[in-house]
């Protein structure tokens, strides 16, 4: 199966299925002699792992990462970093009823038709469990970027119709995250109560993750086809359940006049506004990069649904299993990770053009 790798200079290839023995990956292009904080990597995984609160899936996984190569005495060696995360709470029998059935809005049908043979246990390779591997690579990339003064911060800005308003680019973030990862406690509680109510109905709801990057140097990105925002968009749209990506003014910019939308330069090279979202001509301009990622309602609901089986016969899909009623609380570290992977890859490419 192609399409399991991302990056040009800093690359990640992942492997594994939701209810297989393990998931893992190989990270290449990591500079040598850098002291990695392994606890920080595990912390990012803990932010993503299931079972961490009552508003996420109750699958119990420690998600403990084991580094197999590329790190010696706490420092990177420059060789590929291999890692593995064992699947401890496997319940493949829970999915036996889906062997010949295509769940609505899942990858079951497309995988079956494309490959002719699919792992139906929890979605197999198409499961969001694979994103834990991305979080490992992103956590490593984050440490390199932070050493260069580049900070990536994401949070939940919307659940259903409950929206966090105001200047989100400069919004102060609390040191301690709440369970929904919205920085406004009042809005957060409203979101939490709403997700709980949706779960009681046996249904799901979508949301939006807002991400901002502070401290990006001028020059990240390539002309024409490898534009920075294009790769950020591709990275975000590769995350399970993502249905939309917009950076800077995004779709709201269509209602503005050019005289309102243009970012006027100041003598020091900064701009008076930042509708460009920190990227112009596909290259970072030194201003904060910010974007929104829209997540659909989880396709698995605790209600019976009409569908078909592999013979084209109408069937009823049983509503059962362990799933998130809303993915955005656990999606925050995934968005940060994918952003870090892209930015660090471009940073390494940028160094080659500068030195």
Image: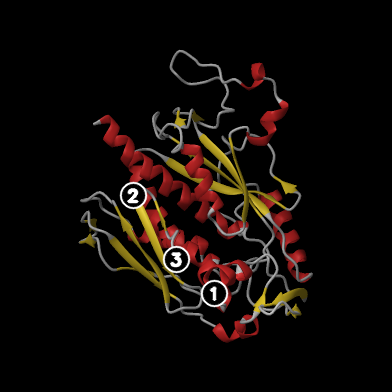
* Front label number (2 vs 3): 3
- Residue appearing at x 39%, y 30% in the figure: 219
Q: Is residue 311 above or below residue 23?
A: below
Q: Is residue 325 above or below residue 210?
A: below
Q: Report whether 9 appears left or right of 101.
A: left
Q: Residue furthest top?
A: 267
The C terminus, quarter of image: top left
Instruction: Determine which of the numbered discs, if any, sits on residue 1 in the image.
Output: 3
Q: Report whether 102 appears left or right of 127.
A: right
Number of marks drawn: 3
Percent across and percent down for residue 295 are 64, 54
Percent across and percent down for residue 250 are 63, 35
Along the polypeptide, which appears first: circle 2 or circle 1? 2
Q: Is residue 78 above or below residue 303?
A: above
Q: Is residue 11 above or below residue 219?
A: below
Percent across and percent down for residue 206 are 69, 56
Along the polypeptide, which appears first: circle 1 or circle 3? 3
Percent across and percent down for residue 40 are 38, 57
- Residue appearing at x 64%, y 81% in the figure: 100
Residue that label 1 marks: 116
Local secondary structure at mark 2 = loop
Q: Are marks 2 and 1 in contact (CB under 8 Å)?
A: no
* Front label number (2 vs 1): 1
Instruction: Determine which of the numbered discs, if any, sits on residue 10 in the image.
Output: 2
């Amino acid at each position: 199966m192609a399409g399991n790798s991302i990056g040009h200079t800093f690359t990640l290839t992942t492997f594994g299925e939701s209810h297989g023995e393990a998931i893992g990956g190989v990270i290449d292009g990591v500079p040598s002699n850098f002291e990695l904080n392994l606890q920080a990597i595990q912390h990012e995984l803990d932010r993503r792992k299931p079972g961490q609160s009552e508003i996420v899936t109750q699958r119990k996984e420690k998600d403990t990462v084991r580094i197999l190569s590329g790190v010696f005495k706490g420092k990177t060696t420059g060789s590929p970093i291999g890692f593995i995360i064992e699947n401890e709470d496997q319940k493949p029998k829970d999915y036996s009823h889906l062997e010949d059935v295509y769940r609505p809005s899942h990858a079951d049908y497309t995988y079956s038709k494309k490959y002719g043979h699919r792992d139906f246990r929890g979605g197999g390779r198409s499961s969001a469990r694979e994103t834990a591997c991305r979080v490992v690579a992103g956590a490593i990339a984050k440490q390199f970027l932070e050493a260069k003064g580049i900070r990536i911060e994401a949070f939940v800005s919307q659940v259903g119709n409950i929206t966090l308003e105001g200047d989100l680019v400069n919004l102060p973030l609390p040191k301690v995250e709440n369970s929904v990862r919205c920085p406004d406690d009042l809005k957060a509680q409203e979101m939490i109560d709403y997700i709980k109510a949706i779960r009681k109905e046996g249904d799901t709801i979508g949301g939006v993750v807002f991400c901002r990057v502070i401290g990006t140097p001028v020059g990240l990105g390539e002309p024409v086809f490898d534009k920075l925002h294009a790769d950020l968009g591709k990275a975000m749209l590769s995350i399970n359940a993502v249905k939309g990506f917009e950076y800077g003014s995004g779709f709201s910019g269509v209602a503005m006049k050019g005289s309102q939308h243009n970012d006027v330069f100041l003598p020091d090279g900064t701009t008076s506004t930042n509708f460009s979202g920190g990227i112009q001509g596909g290259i970072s301009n030194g201003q904060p990069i910010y974007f929104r990622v829209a997540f659909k309602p989880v396709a698995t609901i605790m209600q019976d649904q009409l569908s078909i089986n592999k013979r084209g016969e109408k069937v009823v899909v049983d509503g059962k299993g362990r799933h998130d009623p809303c993915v955005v609380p656990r999606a925050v570290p995934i968005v940060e990770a994918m952003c870090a992977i892209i930015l660090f890859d471009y940073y390494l490419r940028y160094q080659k053009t500068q030195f």
